[in-house]
Image (cartoon, helix red, strand yellow):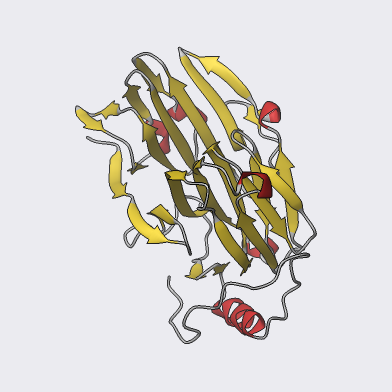
Amino acid sequence: MSNIKLIIEERPANIGNFMVGRLLPFREKRMVGPFSFIDHMGPAAMSDHENLDVPPHPHIGLSTLTFLFEGEITHKDSLGSDVVIKPGQVNWMTSGSGIVHSERTPEYLRYTDKMLHGLQIWVALPKALEQMEPEFFHVEGTDIPAWEQDGVAIKLIAGEAFGRKSPVPVYSPLYFLELKSTSRQKVNIGDYLFGESALYILEGAIESDGHIFEPRQILIANDAKLCEFTMHANTTVYIFGGEPFPEERFIYWNFVASDKKLIEKAKQKWLEQSFKPVPGETGFVPLPDPIRNIKH
């Protein structure tokens, strides 16, 4: 019996002046554990007159995780954070009751040819912490646990697994792992996982139950404890998941909450521009269709 419950293909989505591949949410699977949203950015080659420019926009009820493979992004937020994230580093921003941030190509790269490639992830907060004070953490790549096991290079980008813990300050039981292999390797790591689990193929290919799966797909597991597959040579995959929440989560635009009233309040607050602003930024992303229904 196959352990693959669902296969999700990347779908194109526009985030302003930049196209991404959307992976979550999906109509048949809104969340995997606490993970509620994943965008694959790029790989995009940008010329000396093309830049990433996502103006100030708000979030509530979630933490964002930015992880780059290539390129650099300047993150600024309403807490006063002003950080350039580079490949291998982690930006972890917890919105709680509300935060505003912008994402742009750094000034020193704006007039050069450049690449941008990475993952943008949302992790929903537990109900008791949905209205916590916002926070921002930047974690250096050298501080992320990394080791080799059975011929596979593993990084624990966030959460806990394999008896290790990432310095990224998560708020519920979860894991976000990178696995890289330069040669064909069989992987059996189900004993180290828990809750709901999914695998994203960045490059290369994997084999499972006699089938070959290639990049730009998420494979949702029936049972995290049965996570066994074969990595082809020069393959990189990301495994993510954790304990699901007992309550449903609603999503509207950049807002995630267990109570629709919190989203309606955030919508009104953004319409009124009463969120705390991002220092040094002008302009903002307008609220899309204020009367649009909130999605489950």
Picture quarter with the N terminus: top left
- The residue drawn where x is 67% and y is 53% is 75
* Relative vertical location of residue 51 with respect to residue 72 in this rendering, above or below: below
In the picture, residue 97 is in which quadrant?
bottom right
- The residue drawn where x is 41% and y is 59% is 25
Classify residue 207 as left or right of residue 226: left
Q: Position of residue 70 (x, y in %)?
A: 53, 36
Q: Residue furthest left?
A: 210
Picture quarter with the C terminus: bottom left
Residue 187 visible in rendering: yes
* Relative vertical location of residue 233 with respect to residue 64 in this rendering, above or below: above
- The residue drawn where x is 67% and y is 50% is 107
Residue 3 or 40: which is nearer the viewer? 40
* Relative vertical location of residue 118 with respect to residue 188 in this rendering, above or below: below
- The residue drawn where x is 57% and y is 75% is 259
Q: Position of residue 42 (x, y in %)?
A: 43, 45
Residue 242 visible in rendering: no
Q: How many marks?
A: 0
Q: Position of residue 174 (x, y in %)?
A: 57, 43
In the picture, residue 134 is in which quadrant?
bottom right
Q: Position of residue 60 (x, y in %)?
A: 63, 67
